[in-house]
Structures are given as C-alpha cells and as structure tokens.
Amino acid sequence: MELGMVGLGRMGANMAQRLVRGGHDVTGFDPDERARKSAEANGSSSAASLADLVKALRAPRTVWLMVPAGKITDDTVTALLLLLSAGDTVIDGGNSFYKDTLRRAQASAAKGVRYVDCGTSGGVWGLNEGYSMMIGGDAEAVETLRPIFETLAPAPDKGWGRVGLVGSGHFTKMIHNGIEYGLMQAYAEGFSILRHKQAFDLDLHQIGEIWRYGSVVRSWLLDLTTDALGKNPTMGGIAPYVADSGEGRWTVNEAIDLDVPAPVITLSLLERLRSRETDSFADKLLSAMRNEFGGHAIKKEGA
C-alpha cells in the first residue's frame, strides 16, 4: 500500500521503516533535510515539501502525520487540506488532544477528506516490537487502511483496533498515558522506599529482576525500570526533573469534567510538577507556619 509520512523524527522514521519492511511504498516529508536523507537510507522515498509529497502519491491518497500535538499539527492539517482532494485520507498518529481532533475532522469532512485518529504507543521499541494503535474514525475508512495497521502492529491480529468514532482513538490514548503516569509513579516510589532502607543494603536491580518473573507487578514497564537500574543503580547524573507532554493533564481535566475520581493519576501528575520546583515557596511558607504556631526550628538555606 502507498502512503505519505509527514514527520520523520525518531518515531515517525521508525514507523516508516517498519512499513517499508512490510512491503509498503512510503514517501516521507520532514523540514529537516537530514531526516529525509535518513529515511531514504532506510528505504523510503522523500519529498522536499508537503506539496511535493501530495504530488508523489496516487489518488486516493493516504497521509500519516507524526508531528507534535498543537499548533504544528493544526498548521500541517490546514496546509494539507489545501492540497488534498475528496476521497483522500489523513491519519493523525501523534498525541493530539481529542477535542482538537474533532475540530480537525470536521474541517476535513467539509472538503471530503477522511480523518482518522490513531493513538500510538510503542516508543523507540516499536520498530522491532510493533506498535499499539487505538484508532478512531469511520469504520469503512479504517478497514481500507487495515494493511497499514496490520504491518505496524505487533501482529496482524494483535495490538490494534478501531475503538470508535473519530476522536475516540486519541481519547483512548490520552487515558492510556494517564494510567502510565500512575504506574510509573508507583514503581518510582516503591524502589525509592527500598533504596532508603539502608540497613538491608538492597540490590534494586536484583529485586527488579525477581519481580519480572511470576510477580503480580511484572510488566514491560518494570522490565525497562529494571534495565535502567542495572545501567545506573544510583541514578547518578540524572536531574530530579520529570517532564510531561500534556496527556496526564488532559486526563485529569477529563476526569473532573466527568465527575470521575482519579486520585492516583492526579497525584502522579502533581508529583511531576513538584519535581520541577527547585526553590519551593510553599515549602518555605510551611516551615515559617510551624515556627509561628509552635516555635519549631527553621532550617536556613545552605545549612
């Protein structure tokens, strides 16, 4: 099957490479010439512009987007809709907010262009292991794209599926990432408690290896955690700063809108925000309060 890939960053490039391996004809576009040349080295064709990409594809065209959520996706979709024709299909495989997806799908429908949202998980491992894909869109459109999804998935009948109407794929991926926040936080806290029990001199890598087999907490995320502990047992050289790419915030906001309690996911998000505060005014004020009402000692900066 022939398709265009917009965005040849690491994940987009890996997906293009897996598709080429599966016998698909892929033409990629990225503003970075180095990314285009790298894609060519891995079997894809390349285009120097969106217009050239669209010209290189036979109608009806399929264009897969792997670009950052937000303005970049908006700008790319707007530009594509000026170039595509009725009957063409856009697949957004990035981490777009589902309400943005609904808006973009409406704009696409006005031009007769089908819009499919594909929440994609698998990260840097997807090239060889396959990707988990949560897909939203018209059932007929998704079925037409089946050869693409079967190639990208871990197996043709595993790890992918149409979960509902357009927007539902990105909504499902948003919740997936919210769950991921909670799982990551639980592992991090558990291993931190183990590390602080210095009297036992525990080997965290060894414990992770034990838990990986037969334990009820075994998971791929634990596999990766254990691997990280084996490479760097003390986490030396790593700043205690945890970024977030938006999905956790969207999940918490959605939980509030739906009146659904989600304390674990919410607290895991707050912990990420807390990790970035190197000079906490709130903690200083708490210390001052204790001194005011109870005369408790205040620890001075630098002490």
Image (spheres, rainbow, N blue to C red):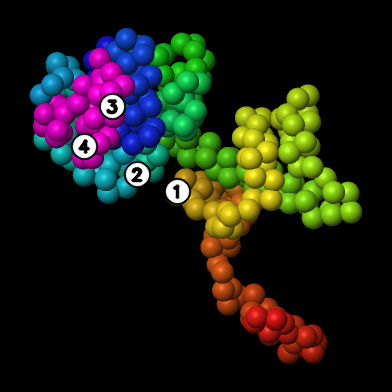
Mark with earlier residue (3, 2): 3
Residue hosting label 4? 33
User: Three-letter amino acid code at disc 4?
Assistant: Glu
Going 89% across and 54% down the picture, which residue do you hit?
199
Looking at the image, residue 104 lies above or below residue 237 = above
Q: Which mark is residue 154?
A: none
Looking at the image, residue 297 lies above or below residue 106 = below
Going 24% across and 31% down the picture, which residue do you hit?
36
Disc 1 residue crowd, few under 14, some 14–19, many 20+, Cα 10 Å: few
- Give me the C-alpha separation between circle 2 and circle 1: 9 Å
- Give me the C-alpha separation between circle 4 and circle 2: 22 Å
Q: Can you see residue 166? A: no
Residue hosting label 3? 39
Query: Is 191 in the magenta?
Result: no
Mark with earlier residue (4, 3): 4
User: Three-letter amino acid code at disc 2?
Assistant: Ala
Q: Which mark is residue 69?
A: 2
Residue 30 horizontal/vertical position (percent) = 23, 36
- Give me the C-alpha separation between circle 1 and circle 3: 26 Å
Going 50% across and 21% down the picture, which residue do you hit?
129
Mark with earlier residue (1, 4): 4
Secondary structure category for the residue under label 4: helix
Q: Can you see residue 157? A: yes
Mark with earlier residue (4, 2): 4
| Magenta stretch bounds | 25-54
Whether residues under marks 2 and 1 lie with C-beta atoms below 8 angstroms apart, the answer is: yes
User: Three-letter amino acid code at disc 1?
Assistant: Ser
